[in-house]
């Protein structure tokens, strides 16, 4: 009995040590928890209290996962905006980005076109994926390059009161374009990826080679049904300023989302499996670069 117990105990200890040494793997469920936490704050449009609370939640989570976090304050159109930027590692910079602000008006909603968009998918799903990546990215990756995770404010106020789109992203792009030490080798933006009926096409203004590489990785993982390797939409979003300033940039987005800019962009539309697939693809892509 005693010998048997000791053997079981040492096996359990070995298992715990083994698990402890493995890098954590991306969990769609964990990513969903972040989307849920953001959603619970309410609409997070520029200048709102929920927007500030979202920035605080993102910064706190990143710090807990051991990233160096800076907050980038900027003023635009009479509002104060804040990008949350996390970095880890040394070497050439690569950038993953998303926006956390949500749209102040649901102009595609027939019933309530002047109410704010809840933004579970648009402004929520990308944050969930990037925060879970912050937990799970293999430290071996950041031993060779500097990974920057950017959470932009002011993407989704575009076209209202003369505002541009992607105000926060443009601010960072300007800064990085002129910085020889941290100009990113590539920029991958993630937004609106949580739809259960997931279909991601190449975006027209995105880098062709970046698109091809990311979709190849997705196909290797068996996700060819969701990652359709052909062009469909042309979008002005957070990848745009980086591309305009000559950086290799692409956006990973499922733009065929019937609840886009409506009051129905809610948590029940978000699928754990969809978040999982995008997390798996980005994990494998970053590893292979
Ligand atoms: Zn939007």
Image (cartoon, rainbow, N blue to C red):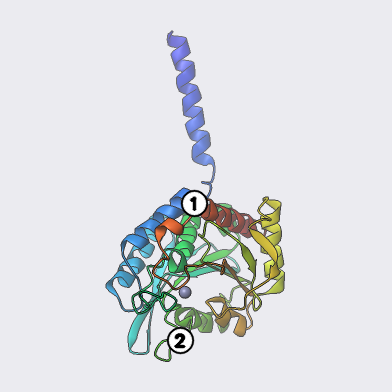
How many marks can you see?
2
Question: Which element is circle 2 on?
Answer: loop
**Percent position (x, y) of residue 178?**
56, 84
Residue 215 seen by the camera: yes
Numbered tag placed on residue 159 in the rendering: 2
Numbered tag placed on residue 131 in the rendering: none
Horizontally, residue 107 falls left or right of residue 144, namely: left
Numbered tag placed on residue 272 in the rendering: 1
Are the residues tagged 2 and 1 within 8 Å (C-beta)? no
User: Up-down: is 24 above or below 91?
Assistant: above
Q: Residue at x 47, y 32 (%)?
A: 16
Tag 1: Cα neighbours inside 10 Å, few (<14), some, or many (≥20)? some
Quarter residue 201 falls in: bottom right
Which residue is at the far left?
49
User: Up-down: is 246 above or below 217?
Assistant: below
User: Up-down: is 5 above or below 154?
Assistant: above
């Amino acid at each position: 009995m005693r010998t048997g117990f000791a053997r079981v105990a040492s096996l359990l200890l070995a298992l715990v040590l083994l698990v402890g040494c493995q890098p954590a793997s991306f969990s769609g469920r964990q990513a969903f928890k972040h989307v849920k936490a953001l959603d619970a704050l309410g609409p997070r449009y520029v200048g709102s209290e929920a927007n500030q609370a979202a920035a605080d939640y993102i910064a706190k989570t990143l710090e807990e996962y051991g990233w160096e976090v800076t907050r980038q304050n900027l003023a635009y159109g009479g509002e104060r905006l804040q990008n949350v930027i996390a970095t880890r590692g040394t070497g050439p910079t690569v950038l993953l980005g998303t926006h956390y602000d949500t749209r102040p008006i649901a102009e595609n909603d027939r019933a309530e076109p002047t109410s704010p968009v809840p933004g579970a998918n648009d402004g929520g799903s990308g944050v969930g994926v990037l925060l879970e990546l912050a937990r799970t990215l293999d430290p071996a990756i950041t031993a060779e390059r500097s990974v920057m995770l950017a959470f932009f404010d002011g993407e989704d106020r575009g076209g209202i009161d003369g505002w541009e789109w992607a105000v926060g992203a443009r601010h960072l792009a300007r800064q990085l374009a002129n910085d020889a030490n941290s100009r990113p080798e590539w920029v991958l933006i993630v937004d609106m990826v949580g739809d259960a009926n997931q279909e991601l096409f190449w975006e027209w203004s995105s880098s062709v080679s970046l698109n091809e590489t990311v979709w190849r990785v997705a196909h290797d993982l068996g996700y060819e049904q969701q990652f359709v390797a052909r062009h469909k939409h042309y979008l002005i979003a957070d990848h745009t300023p980086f591309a305009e300033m000559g950086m290799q940039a692409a956006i990973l987005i499922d733009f065929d989302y019937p609840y886009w800019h409506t009051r129905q962009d809610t948590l029940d539309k978000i699928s754990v499996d969809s978040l999982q697939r995008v997390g798996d693809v980005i994990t494998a892509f970053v590893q292979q670069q």
